Image (cartoon, grey):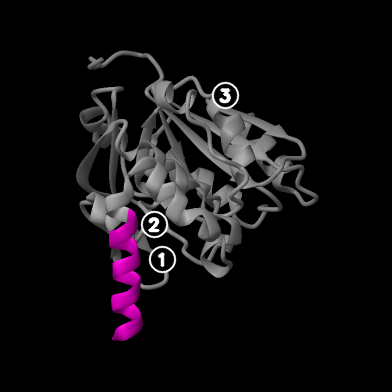
Amino acid sequence: MCFQKSNKILLSIVIPTYNSDNLIEHCLSNIYKKLGNSNRYQILIIDGFSQDNTITIVDQIAGQHKNITYISEKDKGIYDAMNKGILMAEGDFLYFLGADDEILFEMKDIENSLIDDNVIYYGNVIFKDSNKKYDGLFNTKKLIEKNICHQSIFYPRKILVNNFYNIHYKLLADYELNIRLWKKYVFKYIDISFAIYSNDGISTQMKDIEFRKDFLKIIYTHLGIKYVFLKILNKIKKLLR
């Protein structure tokens, strides 16, 4: 389905939080600075029962803006929170943001780009620590070596309500999801840097052991045996360097 401009909610921005009182005010301020008070988007704060002042801050900001909804309850990790966001979302597209990230896009960018809810759109992010752009156009060969950063992806809601994050993978469920969706749906690259990504989060500091253990099986199931062999060959080449 292709969209014409309307007052319908186009984008749901889902922000999982836990003890983020030092980050969330700046995160939300950045969103309002870039997107204004448009009724074309909503913000969903999915909090994991923070023990600091995160929800107090969010509640104060929500009192000034009508497009913030929040919940605070115990969850089973960040991807469980993101799945809750999928169920709560009203927008045609979903976008996941960390409390320590900043968006770079404006409403006109997404209104001109997110035009077909059968397509998963993605672009780039800028790494906060190095100012490096990540990471351009992907193909299958590239996807088996690195993930598309989820701060650069806009998923149609109608796709995600049938494809939730696998919470068995604590740190790289977004990678598993992208591989799972890659052959089933159209991914379209947009040459825009959508966010400043704070790449010092837990997923960049720790390894997802279960994901790594299942990685070749995930590739085989969703991409085929050809890419399992290619992944193994690439690994051997790296070891021989």
Helix, strand, or loop for circle 3? helix
Q: Position of residue 100 (x, y in %)?
A: 53, 56
Q: Residue at x 61, y 31 (%)?
A: 84
Nearer to the camera, 21 or 64: 21
Nearer to the camera, 95 or 20: 95
- The residue indicated by pointer 3 is 87
- The residue indicated by pointer 2 is 196
What is the quadrant of the C terminus in the image?
bottom left
Q: Residue at x 27, y 52 (%)?
A: 226
Residues marked 2 and 1 touching at CB (< 8 Å) = yes
- The residue indicated by pointer 1 is 128
Helix, strand, or loop for circle 1? loop
Magenta residues (range) = 228-241
Can the viewer see residue 1?
A: yes
Q: Position of residue 145 (x, y in %)?
A: 33, 61
Q: Position of residue 157 (x, y in %)?
A: 43, 24
Mark nearer the N terminus (3 vs 2):
3
- Based on the picture, tell me whether residue 231 belongs to the magenta stretch: yes
Which amino acid type is marked by label 1?
Answer: Lys
Q: Residue at x 32, y 49 (%)?
A: 225
- Most common secondary structure along the magenta stretch: helix
Helix, strand, or loop for circle 2? strand
Can the viewer see residue 124?
A: no
- The crowd level at tag 1 (other Cα within 10 Å; few <14, some 14-19, many 20+) is some
What is the quadrant of the N terminus in the image?
top left
Q: Position of residue 188 (x, y in %)?
A: 22, 38
Mark nearer the N terminus (3 vs 1):
3
Please state if 182 lies on the left or on the right of 24 as rendered: left
